[in-house]
């Protein structure tokens, strides 16, 4: 299984970025998918996840609710994290993760992890 995250970069406060996670070696609709991030000097934290059931239930960290949106394209084996109104505190390395389950969680219980993509929010 491989997860390839991309789309990070430098953006000004208030800007937007779109992160993608391309999955290989698994059938995406059997897996819960999530995005985590790790800021410099801080522990990794869950940002958002999407369940594998047909409802596509999503969960968000409180600080990103209303600004971030997670979605999945099972046909393309891709998970997207659309980020708007970015703040300096959103800076960090963003990782996508997967686990074969039904309902998502922001706890770090995922089996597969991508290599991370750096997001820097700064003026």
Image: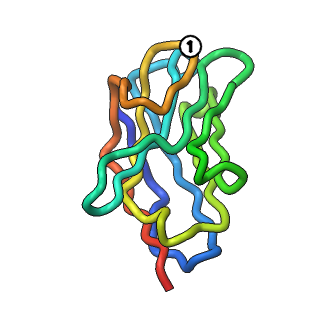
Is residue 32 positioned above or below 23 on the image? above
Q: Nearer the viewer, residue 84 or 46?
A: 46
Up/down of 111 relative to 39, above or below: above
Quick one: which residue is furthest to the front in this view? 62
Residue furthest left in the image: 41
78 lies left or right of 107: right
| SS class, disc 1 | loop
Which residue is depicted at the point 37% across and 26% down?
110
Q: Which percent across, then down, holds residue 1?
A: 33, 25
Residue at position x 45%, y 69% from top?
9
Is disc 1 surrounded by few (<14), some (14 to 19) or many (20+) residues within 10 Å? some
Q: Position of residue 22 (x, y in %)?
A: 47, 39
Instruction: Please state if 106 lies on the left or on the right of 67 as rendered.
Output: left
Q: Which residue is mark 1?
A: 102
**Which residue occupies 38% across, 60% down?**
92
Residue 120: x and y, percent?
A: 43, 70
Left or right of residue 66, residue 64 in this image: left
Q: Quadrant of residue 102?
A: top right
Q: Nearer the viewer, residue 74 or 123?
A: 123
Residue toward you, 105 or 18: 105
Q: Is residue 38 above or below residue 100?
A: below
Up-down relation of residue 13 to residue 109 (above or below):
below
What is the quadrant of residue 67 in the picture? bottom right
- Residue at 46% from the left image edge and 74% from the top image edge: 10
């Amino acid at each position: 299984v491989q997860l390839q995250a991309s789309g990070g970069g430098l953006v000004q406060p208030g800007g937007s970025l779109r992160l993608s996670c391309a999955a290989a070696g698994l059938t995406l609709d059997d897996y819960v998918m999530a995005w985590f991030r790790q800021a410099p000097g801080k522990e990794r934290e869950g940002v958002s996840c999407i369940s594998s059931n047909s409802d596509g239930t999503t969960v968000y960290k409180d600080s990103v609710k209303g600004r971030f949106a997670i979605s999945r394209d099972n046909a393309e084996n891709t998970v997207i994290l659309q980020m708007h109104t970015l703040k300096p505190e959103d800076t960090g390395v963003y990782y996508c993760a997967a686990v074969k389950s039904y309902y998502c969680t922001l706890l770090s219980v995922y089996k597969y992890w991508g290599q991370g993509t750096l997001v820097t929010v700064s003026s």
